[in-house]
Image (spheres, grey):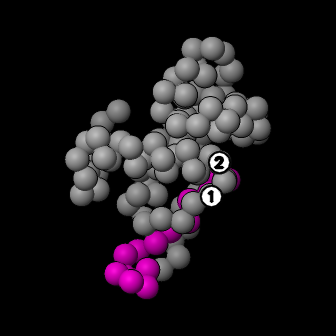
Amino acid sequence: MPRTRKLGRDTAHRTAMLRGLVTFFFENGKIETTVTRAKEVQSMAEKMLTIAKEDNLHNRRLVLSFITKEAVTHKLFTEVAPKYVDRAGGYTRITKIGPRRGDAAEMAILELV
């Protein structure tokens, strides 16, 4: 899955960070992070949700290879994905909330629609 944003990290660190953020996103339904990270997580989360719309062993293994918690994968297939079966895409929304107090990084909330 080619991406152009490096987020100031090497490949292994960036992949681990995105896996953690996507897992946390599906665990809680929304996350608050920087805008650039939110855009990357949105891309990965929508791909995982598209795969999870069809429940079979192959798709479960594909999702589990990226999401770090088995319980979150189960929740994705049983609770989250059935809500979006009739939807063709656009499962998430990014809402900008202004600059962060410490370093003025632009913050956003990523949530399921």
Q: Is residue 17 above or below residue 74?
A: below
Give the residues in magenta: 99-113
Secondary structure state at the residue bearing disc 1: strand
Question: Disc 2 residue type?
Answer: Glu
Q: Nearer the viewer, residue 86 or 11?
A: 11
Q: Is residue 86 above or below residue 33?
A: above
- Left or right: where 61 falls relative to 12: right
Residue corresponding to mark 1: 30
- Expressed as whole percent of the image width and height from the top left, the position of residue 27 reads 65, 48
Residue positioned 41% across, 74% down in the render: 106
Residue positioned 71% across, 37% down in the render: 75
Residue corresponding to mark 2: 27
Q: How many marks?
A: 2
Q: Would you call the spot at circle 1 few (<14 residues within 10 Å), some (14-19), or many (20 or more)?
A: some
- Expressed as whole percent of the image width and height from the top left, the position of residue 72 reads 65, 39
Q: CA distance from mark 1 to mark 2?
A: 8 Å
Q: Would you call the spot at circle 2 few (<14 residues within 10 Å), some (14-19), or many (20 or more)?
A: some
Secondary structure state at the residue bearing disc 2: helix
- Expressed as whole percent of the image width and height from the top left, the position of residue 78 reads 76, 32
Residue positioned 77% across, 38% down in the render: 79
Question: Residue 58: which numbered mark, if any?
Answer: none
Residue positioned 42% across, 65% down in the render: 35
Question: Disc 1 residue type?
Answer: Lys
Q: Is residue 105 above or below residue 2?
A: below
Locate residue 70: give its quadrant. top right
- Residue 86 visible in rendering: no
- Residue 66 visible in rendering: yes
Is residue 102 on the magenta stretch?
Answer: yes
Q: Nearer the viewer, residue 102 or 5?
A: 102
